[in-house]
Image: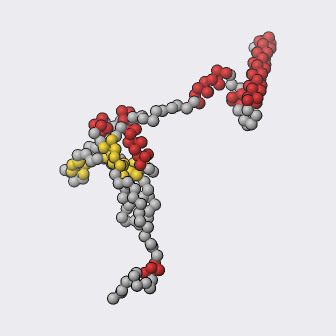
Amino acid sequence: MSALRQVMCRGTASLQLYQANKLAAARWASASSTSQDSGPLDPKTALARPEELDQRNKLSGKITVPTAVNLGPISGVPEEHLKERRVRIHIPPKNAMQSGTDNINTWQIEFDNRERWENPLMGWASSGDPLSNMNVQFGSPEEAITYCERNGWRWYVDGAEKPKKERVKNYGINFAWNKRTRVSTK
C-alpha cells in the first residue's frame, strides 16, 4: 500500500473514532442528565449508531397477544376431535395403595370416551382417539379452564373441592376413662 493511502486510511479511521467518541459522550451526557442513579452505562448502547438503537428498541418491545386465542386450528388435532369433544375437569382420586396426601391438590382434564374395540390378535383394548390417553394436570381449575378455552374444547367442572371434616387422631383417646367414650372389650 502506498504511503499516501496509509496516511489517508489512518486519517479516516481517526476521524471516525473521534466522531464515535463525540457521539458517545453526547449520549452519556444526555443519559446522565435524565437519570442520575441509572447505574453503569452499557458499552453496546453507548457506541451504537442511532439506527441500531431504534432497531433494538423495536425488537425489545413486548408482543401483546389477545387472551381469547383459539389454538385449535393450529394444534394439529383433527376437526372432529375439536368441535364435538367435551372435557371433564376434575380432581383425580387419591391412590388407594398409598396413604399420603401430597399429590391430591391437582386438577386434571379428561376427554369423553370415543369408540373402543378389542384387538382380535392380542385382545387389547384399542381406540382411534388420539386424545383418549392425554393426561394433563393443573394447579387450579382456572388454569384448566383457560387451557380448554384456548384449544377450543367445551368443558365442565366435575366435583368441586369439598372441605374435609377434621378427625381427631390421638392414640390416647383409645384409653380414655370416660363413660361416654369408653368401649367395652367384652
Name the image quarter holding the N terminus: top right
On screen, residue 47 versus residue 143, left or right, reads right
Query: Where residue 105 sits in the image (x, y, percent)?
Result: 44, 56
Which residue extends farthest front?
180
Q: Report if residue 61 is visible in the image.
A: yes
Q: Nearer the viewer, residue 55 or 86?
A: 86
On screen, residue 165 versus residue 55, left or right, reads left
Q: Residue at x 25, y 45 (%)?
A: 114
Which residue extends farthest bottom?
186
Query: Where residue 41 sits in the image (x, y, percent)?
Result: 73, 33
Q: Residue at x 43, y 45 (%)?
A: 143
Name the image quarter holding the C terminus: bottom left
Count of numbered tags: 0
Q: Nearer the viewer, residue 106 or 23?
A: 106
Query: Where residue 127 sits in the image (x, y, percent)?
Result: 26, 46
Q: Residue at x 79, y 15 (%)?
A: 11
Compared with 77, 123 (above or below) is: below
| Protein image colouring | secondary structure
Indicate the quadrant where residue 38 lies.
top right
Q: Residue at x 35, y 54 (%)?
A: 159
Compared with 26, 169 (above or below) is: below
On screen, residue 21 versus residue 103, left or right, reads right
Query: Where residue 97 sits in the image (x, y, percent)?
Result: 37, 65
Q: Report if residue 175 is visible in the image.
A: no
On screen, residue 122 versus residue 93, left or right, reads left
Indicate the quadrant where residue 6 lies.
top right
